[in-house]
Image (cartoon, rainbow, N blue to C red):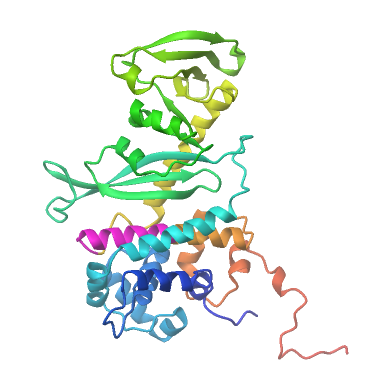
Amino acid sequence: MYTGRIVFSQVMDHMPSHIFRRCVQRYQGNHKIQTFTCLDQYLCMAFAQLTYRESLRDIEVCLRAQSSKLYHMGIRGGVSRNTLANANQVRDWRIYADYTQELIQIARHLYADEEIGLELDGTVYALDSTTIDLCLSVFPWADFRKNKAAIKLHTLLDLRGNIPSFIHISDGKLHDVNALDLLTTEPGAFYVMDRAYVDYTRLYGLNQAKAFFVTRTKSNHQMRRQYSHPVDKSTGIIYDQTVVLTGVKTSKNYPEKLRRIKYHDSERNKTLTFLTNNFILPALTIAELYRARWQVELFFKWIKQNLRIKSFFGTSENAVKTQIWIAISIYVLVAIIKKRLGLEASLYTILQILSVTIFEKTSLIQMVAGDDNSLKGETPSNQLKLFD
């Protein structure tokens, strides 16, 4: 019988503590703090994410009900909703943002050899954003529209493992295309994005940085065909063309040739036209690359459904960003655990199991795998041996 530590402690074993301490020191997070350190704050918020708590009172009641286990969870300070609310209010959110970025680097290294269903050597990124609606009277700093507040989560998703490699939290007014200015371009990588990111000056910047992009054309853009390449129409490819922009401004913003591919998706009965600066890959591969972009949509849907970013535990900008970054860090931490332990279950399944077994003293591998192979061959210490 497994008599070790509780499940929460086993999960937090995969947390790189030395990196967390370095992030705290960088922003002096524990300056003049006697009790309830940044680590206590993070562990309480992580507990809230893993067990789907909806409010500060909810967190306080649940943790106080298990007060005898707080030490084993790593929580040394007293837990109260006022203390946690104050910590979320005043402690720099960049502590948790930097820590999450470090976790992302660890996860990307683990998933570097993950298959994405396409024979590509370069990294493939999907760029998109999602809007989280807020109440304007409660969150006046998150200006969006006249009677509405919102924040945007701009995400660059590495499709090898679906790990977010870049995240930026802004108010709702920041246009999607401006997120391109915040990226550090990786030469040889593919950036897949929808029509909201079509800005030829910025796309030309990607081209000059030796990166590739795949996006969709807008109906009002002017371009002229120079060459038509042979295609196999049975694959859904309607045409594959080399084009140049002919607009007065666009021809100056992007003076080089582009590739235009028209594709009919028989599954969804949609016809799509793609624009790319890659002239090497087959036209069907370009279409498949854009199809893979839907992974970022699934990531946003998964984040909203499974992590606590709809009900916020504070109303200040610092509290909201703290909660979002900790939520994302839990997503990445569970992805790291899944890879390190070789778990076959999906992230959704793992989180659902953790939510109801967080205080159990059960082996994490055995619990998620759902078998008792680790117990075979063991004899309980109090069992008599009748046939020695």
Q: Is residue 385 left or right of residue 138?
A: right
Q: Is residue 22 visible?
A: yes
Q: Is residue 346 visible?
A: no
Q: Which residue of the protein is positioned furthest toward the right in this rendering? A: 388
Residue 259 placed where, x, y %? 49, 19
Magenta span contains residue 248: no
Residue drawn at x 40%, y 28% as measured from the top left: 204
Q: On screen, 19 above or below 178? A: below
Q: On screen, 381 above or below 270? A: below
Residue drawn at x 41%, y 24% as measured from the top left: 216
Q: Is residue 157 left or right of residue 199?
A: right
Q: Quadrant of the C terminus?
A: bottom right
Most foreground residue, 152 or 303:
152
Give the quarter of the image for residue 365: bottom right
Give the quarter of the image for residue 274: top left
Residue range in magenta is 314-329
Q: Quadrant of the N terminus?
A: bottom right
Give the quarter of the image for residue 92: bottom left
Residue 154 placed where, x, y %? 35, 45
Magenta span contains residue 320: yes
Most foreground residue, 232 or 358:
232
Q: Is residue 38 left or right of residue 289?
A: left
Residue drawn at x 30%, y 38% as measured from the top left: 178
Main SS category, magenta section: helix
Residue drawn at x 63%, y 68% as measured from the top left: 366
Residue 34 placed where, x, y %? 29, 86
Q: How many marks?
A: 0
Residue 79 placed where, x, y %? 31, 80
Q: On screen, 3 above or below 180? A: below
Most foreground residue, 227 or 11:
227
